[in-house]
Image (cartoon, coloured by chain):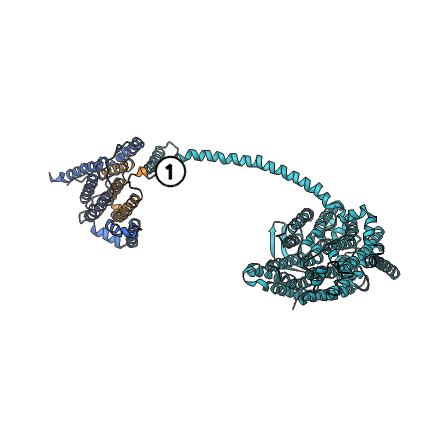
Chain colours: A orange, B blue, C cyan
Amino acid sequence: MTHVPLGAFIAVSAMLFFIGCAGVLMRRNAVVILMCVELMLNAANLALVAFSRRLPAADERGSVFVTFVFVIAAAEVAVGLAIVLAAYRNRPSVDVDEARAMRG
Amino acid sequence: MFDLIEPIVFVLLSVALVGAGAAVVLLRRITSGALLMAFTFLCIAGMFVLLGAETIAAFQVLIYVGAITVLILYGVMFTPQSPRSYPLFFQRQTPLAAVFVALIAVPVVFIALSFRDGGPPASGGGDLVPLATSLFGPFAFPFEVASVLLLAAMIGAIALVKREDPLDDEFGEERL
Amino acid sequence: MNLVDLVWLIPAFPLAAFLVNGIFGRRWLGKATGPIASAAVAASAVLALGVFSQVAGGHAQTVVPLYEWIGVADFRVDVAALVDPLSATMLVVVTVVSLLVHVYSIGYMAHDHGLHRFFTWLPLFVFAMLVLVLADNYLLMFVGWEGVGLCSYLLIGFWFERPEPQGAAKKAFVMNRIGDWGFMIGMITTFLLFGTLNFTEVFERVGIAQQGVLTLICLAFFLGATGKSAQLPLYSWLPDAMEGPSPVSALIHAATMVTAGVYLVARSTPLFAAAGPALQVVGAVGALTAIFAATIALVQFDIKRVMAYSTVSQLGYMFLALGVGAPIAAMFHLFTHAFFKALLFLGSGSVIHGIDDVQDMRRMGGLRSKMPITYWTMVIAGGALAAIPPLAGFWSKDEILATAFLNGHTLLWLVGLVTGALTAFYVTRAIWLTFHGEPRDRHLFDHAHESPRIMTIPLLVLAVGSVLAGFVGVPPESGFIHRFLGPVTEAAGRATEQAPAVTSIIALAALSVVASVVGILIGLSMYARHHPDPAAVARAAGPYYRVLVNKYYVDELYDRRFVGLANAFAGASWAFDIHIIDGIVNRLGSLFGILGSGLRRAQTGLVGNYALSIVAGLLAVMIAYGGYAAGVFGR
């Protein structure tokens, strides 16, 4: 049985991460940005699980962290969406470029 | 022939994953984006199975493909997706962002490829037992704290979305 | 029980009263502040009397340390009380007079809406004065010195709604500051010369100093004393200080605070004794001030101003005594003067209180029948001031004059003698104008009334003091006070005067009594019989009279010379501040304003830009890490 090397998993994880990163930087819709953040989190999860399974020294700790990332991601999405909705209620737009109250 | 099943599955999953991810970023229609995102999550779950982490994969399906996708879809539903009069991408910073991300991504991916396995792969048995011993052993306290975090997030989300106007209470509840 | 070890309690009681009245006075205590303050000062007075009797009973000079205040390398200053006959005497004077004035004030200030404020500052003053008296080093003394100055300022300006008290308070403060400057110069030079500020240590080391430097130190301290004790040239704040309430005038500007300068010089006797010329300056300034102020007092019509100039004049006597080498006589006069001058002020206050706050003697007259107690106590005090035997003032003033004559300062003696006659004249005039003759203002006369008992009882006590206080100095040169205070000045290595012949003492005493009697008789003849008529005398004296009425134009002179100069300097400083200092600061400020408005552009408010900057930071870290790994920056 041929094993896929660890490096391949990490490379895929990195690619997904930077795709998400580019999305966060380029898109203007707040909901899409949230989605891209989820992609980045998933990429990180993938890397964690890969290290955890393939490096015996990691002693499965990576999986534990992934569990916590799930929790945090769930919380983040819930709060993030709540913020988007609250902002939308105040100003009928989800375009982050129009939220410029912090402009100096 | 069976020897190659794992690499083949991996390549298929990778291509699907990267493609779907790129589509999330590039597609203008937000509903398609959300669904493609769910698909990406599913691919990641497949990756977990490949890595022998069946429990995490199950969580992934439950939480991401299930809960978070639904939440995001609700978000999409409640915000207007008006036709845009301006181009999707070409804000002023977009080229700069692309350059920066590419500059970081290329070396990182190459460095990533250089990682080698640290020893013989774990011999089956899945990850449930080690995960459970860790979570309820040394990580018991952070685990409990995580539940408090979830509670706080839930209350926070309710507080943020709750309407002040009593007349609109029904709508507020509906949104939650 | 050894009361001397508890001496720190004496200032502690008034301090406690100050804190209690200051914190709770306005809201809760109200009228109760007066009794609280009085009780605290009474406790101090009892304890002070106990300490005094122990010291009189032969308790050796003691330093009661509280704690080390400053201890830097060689510089060591303790908060410690020096208990010796000198400070014990002052303790008694300060606490007893303060107690009487506190009690009197309960009546005098009863209808004032700032009552709680009054009974906050008054105990604070007592505390500061006791610190000044008990200090065992110049620095701690300076703390008390400044404290009494502050309280003086606050209490002169007590009725700050009116402009005059405000101005008087500021004047007093500024003039005192000039004196304080002298005190500080003296203190710094003392430290540089002797390496310590402790009284005992400084006096032990007097021998090592050159006379020139010592004279400088003494003159600097004396400048401080002239400020606090209202001597020439810094006297003019004291008459204006009469804008404060009468009890304040009695306590601070007659009996206690203004004697701080005398106390300072008496305390520093070893220094002054070693610096010959300084003593002569002290004596000359004292004599000059005495006659100068007495002449002004001749023609004033404000009853409190007469008393104020009289105080300046009597303080001049004390400095005269110090100058002719008789610190005991100076302290003796300080002691007696505290009683009769406090009484004169409280009596004046009682009169003013009884006739609707009028101070002009031209509107009084005939008040004797309306205010018998005030009248008779004032007469006793006036007699003491005019040095009529056997009242208190006679013994002390006569001793000053006798010592001056016997120590060979004939000119100073003569000045003192003339001043004595003038004093007798103006006090006669003041009492006559106030209490005798026809009432000149019917309306005021009809509404006049004797003060309540809480005010007259202190008057009576002080009257008893004014009669008896002199007997601590009887017989002359070997009375109780001489034996008591003798060690202090002898320890300084001053040659004790050889006992003079009794006949010469009696002759000198007789001369000064004659001078006083002449003064009184002239006063009576002018004001009771109009022979010669005062108005006619004033017309005949013409320009001289005007000079006196205008107080030698000293205020105008100061105004033109010093205030004008100070204003010009202040104007120049202001211009410098506005154009140069502020200019630099404003330029600097606008520089950062420009920088900021440049940086402001970075804050676009676009979340995407912020996210991009995070990524840019990540890129920078990666480049740095890569460079480090490649050894670009060296290892």
Residue A20 occupies which quadrant of the picture? top left
Q: Residues within 10 Å of mark 1 (few under 14, many from 20)?
A: few
Q: Residue B90 placed where, x, y %? A: 28, 31
Q: Quadrant of the N terminus of chain B?
A: top left
Where residue C513 sits in the image (x, y, percent)? 84, 60
Residue on which the image places disc 1: A103
User: Residue furthest toward the bottom?
Assistant: C1
Q: Nearer the viewer, residue C496 or C338?
A: C338
Residue B99 in percent (x, y) is at 30, 31
Residue type beneath disc 1: Arg
Residue C483 seen anywhere in this rendered image of the structure: no
| Residue at the limit of the structure toward the left, as seen here | B1
Horizontal arrangement in the rendering, residue C125 relative to residue C602 (left or right): right
Residue B6 in picture, x, y percent from top left: 15, 40
Residue C560 can be seen, yes or no: yes
Q: Is residue C601 left or right of residue B116?
A: right
Horizontal arrangement in the rendering, residue C215 relative to residue A97 (left or right): right
Q: Chain of mark 1?
A: A
Residue at 51 percent of width and 35 percent of height: C588
Give the secondary structure at mark 1.
Answer: loop
Quarter occupied by residue C381: bottom right
